[in-house]
Image (cartoon, rainbow, N blue to C red):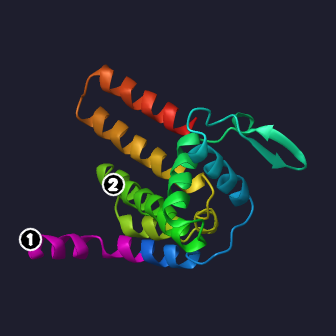
Amino acid sequence: MKEKVNIILEKNIVLIICWLVVSLINLNKAYHIDDTFHLEAGNYIIDHLNTPMSGKINWDNSPTEMYNHNQPPLFFLCIGIIIKLFNSNEITLHIFLSIFTLLALIYYYKILEILDVNKKYIYIILIAFNPAFIVNQNLMTDIPILAITFIFIFYLIEGLQSNKTKKNYNIFNNIKYRVTN
């Protein structure tokens, strides 16, 4: 068991270091830009599970329903759950969001691996330390959507390479559509 863990760590040390560094950069960063909207939406959804998207968010002194803002409600539900369990502490929410950062990096690496790209770790470093990647780790939806997109692309490529049936492609498309809309 210990040998298996050591092999995994040795193989993925660059990936782990990149994730830790970009997560630590974000760990105590103040809420900004759309974070307030996401916090309010999360709070509303967790308290109103029967009508999750009917809540009004006061943005620019004109309250509008959340469904007008084109954001994924499952993400807000997750934020709401974290807030209920641990309060709206910035560090706690940033740790939660770092899971998506890790998933994005892992599945980006897996895509590079399945496409047999040389020097995979250079690409991992380039995406991890891209300014847009670092900034959008806050409570923004960008990194979670990027992670889900990478997961989708990985399984789509894997399915195409293993000649899976058309039914599987429709399942992946359906999941991607429902998660991102």
For the C terminus, give its image quadrant: top right
User: Of discs 1 and 2, which sits in the foreground?
Assistant: 1
Residue at 24% over, 71% down: 11
The part of the image, by quadrant, that contains residue 70 is top right
Q: Badge 2 local density, few (<14 within 10 Å), some, or many (20+)?
A: some
Residue at 45% over, 64% down: 123
Q: Give the main secondary structure of the magenta stretch.
A: helix
Q: Does 10 sit left or right of 172 as displayed?
A: left
Nearest to the observer: residue 160 or residue 181? 181
Vertical placement of 21 versus 160: above or below? below
Residue at 58% over, 41% down: 73
Nearest to the observer: residue 52 or residue 69? 52
Residue 85 point in image, percent of width and height: 48, 61
Residue range in magenta is 1-17
Q: Does 124 sit left or right of 4 as displayed?
A: right
Nearest to the observer: residue 101 or residue 157? 101
Residue 110: mark: 2
Residue 145 point in image, percent of width and height: 53, 48
Residue, disc 1: 1
Amino acid beneath label 1: Met
Amino acid beneath label 2: Lys
Q: What kind of element bears circle 1?
A: loop
In the rendered image, the residue lying farthest to the right is 61
